[in-house]
Image: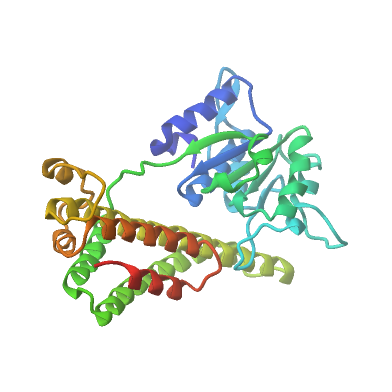
Amino acid sequence: MAFRHFAQQTQGVELLQRSLARGRLGHAYLFAGDQLEELETLARTLAKTLNCRKPVKTGGVATDCCDECLACQKIDHGTHADVFWVRPESKMRQIRIEQIARRDESPARVVNEFVNLKPTEAEYKIGVLVAADRLTPQAANAFLKTLEEPPARSVLILLSTEPQRLLETIQSRCLRLNFSGDHTRPPNPAQLKWLMQFDAMAAGGRKSLLGRYRLLDVLLQKLGEIRSQVEEAMTARSPLQHYDEVEGELREKWEDELAAAIEAEYRHRRAETLLLVQWWLRDIWLATFRSGKSGSAVEGPTPAAMVSLLKFPEISGTSAIAGRITPPQALENLQVLERTQRLLHTNVQEALALEVGLLKLHL
């Protein structure tokens, strides 16, 4: 893809192209956004623009790639000698110091060494750190030295959906560009259909323990479907699917990267699903004020205002559940789900964390 194809990221792309046109190319960028895949595509497009043989120019300076020349094709296929990708490895999803700085006699390339070499066949050396927030403390400190004294004709691009987790010292040395989407966009039809099923079961299950475990089963089935979809999509894009004869060490590296990428994307999609449930619980909290339940020290919205604030007014079970609980109980539901989300960022067993969270909800 070329920059002209990013219709949904007009502002961020325009800022980047404007800086290129003015000759203000940064030595390090931090691309922040909601979708890691999109950030990777943007980083790839910047790499192509800087090394394109037939670039689109503004004022004599390359501001977009042709997306067709040999250099562009090599970068798209991950075979360009001057573009180096660093990804989290293993199920821990970490970028380790061994990927940043050489510590032994291993022949594997590391990013610090890579960017200090002269370009082989292009104008710029490009190093891309995917999910840079997964840098271990040791790796981050080793990488900081390269950021402080970047070699000429090299550009480092850090990608993150959680930039706040990066060290302040790393953030401060990068030009940050935000490519976040619209957080208020409605759920797609499949998400809404699933949430309506979840709502109907919750509204009819009352406080039955069996009902809670049925809810858990619905949620785990949904997450299982999501993981299968992610595995299929990520595996199809892996270089393992395009190169049959690969040396053992490289194959092992790609396998580790694939496992880490699948886990990262799955966790992102899982968080999106739980966010739907959180919005639904917020609707229930709002509806408790209309139900006339007592016990809240917070003055609620008027009925008319409450309806306008609902995220999912078309979901019918909200009022039924709101009629059974108080505003403080509904607020506690939101706090329970927030704690569950935080737990899921650790190495806690997923099913156990979700089971405990669902059993604590007031429904």
Residue 211 shown left or right of residue 85 in the figure: left
Is residue 197 placed above or below 176 in the rendered structure? Answer: below
Q: Residue at x 30, y 45 (%)?
A: 185
Of 192 and 85, nearer the camera is 192
Q: Residue at x 62, y 48 (%)?
A: 74
User: What is the x, y in percent for residue 132?
Assistant: 62, 49
Of 197 and 35, nearer the camera is 197
Which residue is most to the bottom?
210
Q: Quadrant of the C terminus?
A: bottom left
Which residue is most to the top?
59
User: What is the x, y in percent for residue 331?
Assistant: 30, 55
Q: How many marks?
A: 0
Of 63 and 211, nearer the camera is 211
The image quadrant of residue 153 is top right
User: What is the x, y in percent for residue 160?
Assistant: 55, 47
User: What is the x, y in percent for residue 328?
Assistant: 28, 56
Residue 16 shown left or right of residue 320 in the figure: right
Residue 194 shown left or right of residue 26 in the figure: left
The image quadrant of residue 103 is bottom right
Is residue 355 placed above or below 189 in the rendered structure? Answer: below
Colour scheme employed for the rendering of this structure? rainbow
Q: Residue at x 49, y 64 (%)?
A: 343
Residue 316 shown left or right of residue 92 in the figure: left
Of 324 and 247, nearer the camera is 324
Residue 68 appears in the picture as rendered: no
Is residue 359 placed above or below 131 in the rendered structure? Answer: below
Residue 304 appears in the picture as rendered: yes
